[in-house]
Image (cartoon, rainbow, N blue to C red):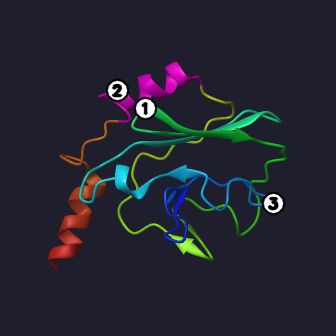
Amino acid sequence: MRYDGRNPGGEYEFIVCPNWQGDGGFGAPKTEVKKDEWHYLTGIVEKNKNMYLYLDGVQVIEGPFSGPISSIGPETDIGHASDGGFVGAIDEVAIYDRALTENEVIQNFKSTRFFAVDAYDKLATTWGNIKKAI
């Protein structure tokens, strides 16, 4: 998951390595992600099937996935890669050992317990505001 401003209409990308599957605009349009608002991005890979990207519980793109997945090496990043990065706060990251269903994505987005998409009363937001004020 990262931001890449070189891909108009798909700036918030979901890329799976090796082979950078999804690079070049497999993402959500910048216009749908408003500045100074929290959003919930979910990337899903079905082994040797498809890749999906959800924004705030709604699927924004689907494409083929040919595998494999690698979790070792410099390409294992959330929010940044050597040729593009996300500027902002990232909070409540979770990695599952299986592909979530669409209903599970929606349930996580609507959850007020674990994945609440709300900046208020969160440690990361409070700490970020303290650092910003210094």
CB atoms at circles 2 and 1 under 8 Å apart? yes
In the rendering, at what x and y percent does residue 33 appear?
Answer: 35, 52
CB atoms at circles 2 and 3 under 8 Å apart? no
Which of pointers 3 and 1 lies earlier in the amino acid sequence? 3
Alpha carbons under labels 2 and 1: distance apart: 8 Å
In the rendering, at what x and y percent does residue 104 appear?
Answer: 51, 22
* Three-letter amino acid code at the position of disc 1: Gly
Q: Which residue is mark 2?
A: 110
Alpha carbons under labels 3 and 1: distance apart: 27 Å
Q: Which residues, given as a range, are shown in magenta? A: 101-115
* Three-letter amino acid code at the position of disc 2: Lys
* In the displayed structure image, the side of residue 108 where residue 94 appears, left or right: right
Please tell me the numbered disc located at residue 19: 3
Q: Pick out the residue farthest to the left.
A: 133
Please tell me the numbered disc located at residue 57: 1
Q: Pick out the residue farthest to the top.
A: 103
Residue found at x 49% / y 57% = 9
- Viewer-side residue, 67 vs 97: 67
* Element under disc 3: loop
For label 3, the crowd category at 10 Å Cα-Cα, with few meaning under 14, some 14 to 19 and many 20 or more, is some
Please tell me the numbered disc located at residue 106: none
* In the displayed structure image, the side of residue 93 where residue 81 appears, left or right: right
Residue found at x 30% / y 56% = 124
